[in-house]
Amino acid sequence: MLESVYHIATIFLLFTLAGALWRTVRGPSAADRLMTAQLFGTTGVALLLLLAESLGMPALRDVALIFALLAILVVLTFVRNSRRQPGREGER
């Protein structure tokens, strides 16, 4: 029973990733693209945690933690670069 819940949640998250991919291609600004990149990171972490539980591989939790920490660095880098170039935020 619990395995099917994991599979349903995984399929839902994969559909979310497909929507994020569409938004990344179509995003009108750099901030939109950053938000979809954050969605990719968050969804990737969730997928790794689901896989860790369903497959019984606790090492995947460590990989998910590393991805979550890297996502913080991406946001900090984006904010730092957008402060340097204030007029370029809405460019394609």
Image (cartoon, helix red, strand yellow):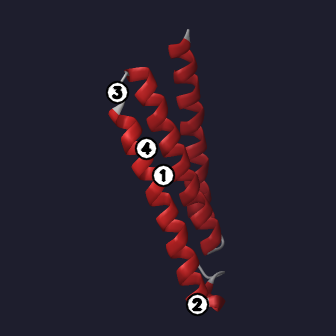
Instruction: Give the crowd class for mark 1: few <14, some 14-19, many >=20 residues within 10 Å.
Output: some
Above-or-below relation of 61 to 38: above
Numbered circle sitting on residue 29: none
Q: Are marks 3 and 4 in contact (CB under 8 Å)?
A: no
| Image position, residue 64 (x, y; %) | 43, 43
Numbered circle sitting on residue 64: 4
**Element carrying mark 2:** loop
Q: Amino acid at mark 3?
A: Met
For marks 1 and 3, give the CA distance: 18 Å
> Residue at label 2?
85
Q: Are marks 4 and 1 in contact (CB under 8 Å)?
A: yes
Is tag 2's residue or tag 4's residue first in the polypeptide sequence?
4
Looking at the rendered image, the disc whose residue lies closer to the viewer, 2 or 1, is 1
Is tag 1's residue or tag 3's residue first in the polypeptide sequence?
3
> Residue at label 3?
57
Q: Specify whether residue 27 is in view.
A: no
For marks 4 and 1, give the CA distance: 6 Å
For marks 3 and 4, give the CA distance: 12 Å
Q: Amino acid at mark 4?
A: Ala
Is tag 3's residue or tag 4's residue first in the polypeptide sequence?
3
